[in-house]
Amino acid sequence: MTNVQRSRRQVRLSRALGIALTPKAQRIFEKRPYAPGEHGRTRRRTESDYAVRLREKQRLRAQYGISEKQLRAAYEKGTHTAGQTGNAMLIDLETRLDALVLRAGFARTIAQARQMVVHRHIMVDGVRVDRPSFHVKPGQLIHVHPKAEKTTPFQAAAAGENQAVLPEVPAYLNVEIEKLHAKLERKPKREEIPVICDEQLVVEYYSRLA
């Protein structure tokens, strides 16, 4: 799939789910805030409880760009964590390396963040990490490999171009964008995590499958 095809797919998915998944999708979604297709402007029919929960699960998956298996694993892990399952699930997803690379402004989209990690451009505490699902612990430093710093995407990131089109850097991250450094200061709080989701509906979706 080419970058153009991927971009169009993300725009279409954004409109279908009612959320902007990329900066480009945000611009287009503001102009056409309805579902794609010839019936996109028409009012949605009354949805079943199952359909509502399913869509919320799909929205969460899309925002983190993860597979069904990965989301289910985060849910299962959350059920064995103290506190609310939904909160634990979101914190688990938010501390993935690819998610934090995006939040820091090193990348413009979650897909680009994942690609940067897979291509071994990202380091954690001085060690290259190529797993987007790697979980960063509080106190760990995320930074760009010196050989990658001078490439065009990272030069643009260091100039703040990505941060200009992304949500504000959350308080749990300490970012020095010009150095391409980001430190996870502490675990995120639910209200700080910049995703649009009613996580309780996602929990209900999986709990009813059990």
Image (cartoon, rainbow, N blue to C red):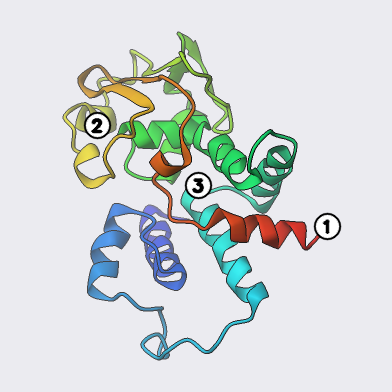
SS assignment at label 2: helix
Residue extending furthest toward the left: 159
Name the residue carrying label 1.
Answer: 210
Question: How many other residues sit within 10 Å of disc 2, few (<14), some (14-19) or many (≥20)?
Answer: many
Q: Where does residue 187 sit, x and y in percent of width and height?
A: 49, 27
Residue 172: x and y in percent read: 38, 27
Q: Is residue 164 visible?
A: yes
Instruction: Establish if 191 lies above or below 50.
Output: above
Marks 3/2 in contact by CB < 8 Å: the verdict is no
Q: CA distance from mark 3 to mark 2?
A: 20 Å
Sequence-wise first label, 2 or 1: 2
User: Residue visible at 50% across and 37% down?
Assistant: 94
> Mark 2 against mark 1, which lies toward the viewer?
1
Amino acid type at circle 1 is: Ala
The residue to which callout 2 is attached is 157
As drawn, is 152 to the left or to the right of 129?
A: left
Identify which residue is drawn at 75% across, 57% down: 207
Q: Which residue is mark 3?
A: 64
For label 3, the SS is helix
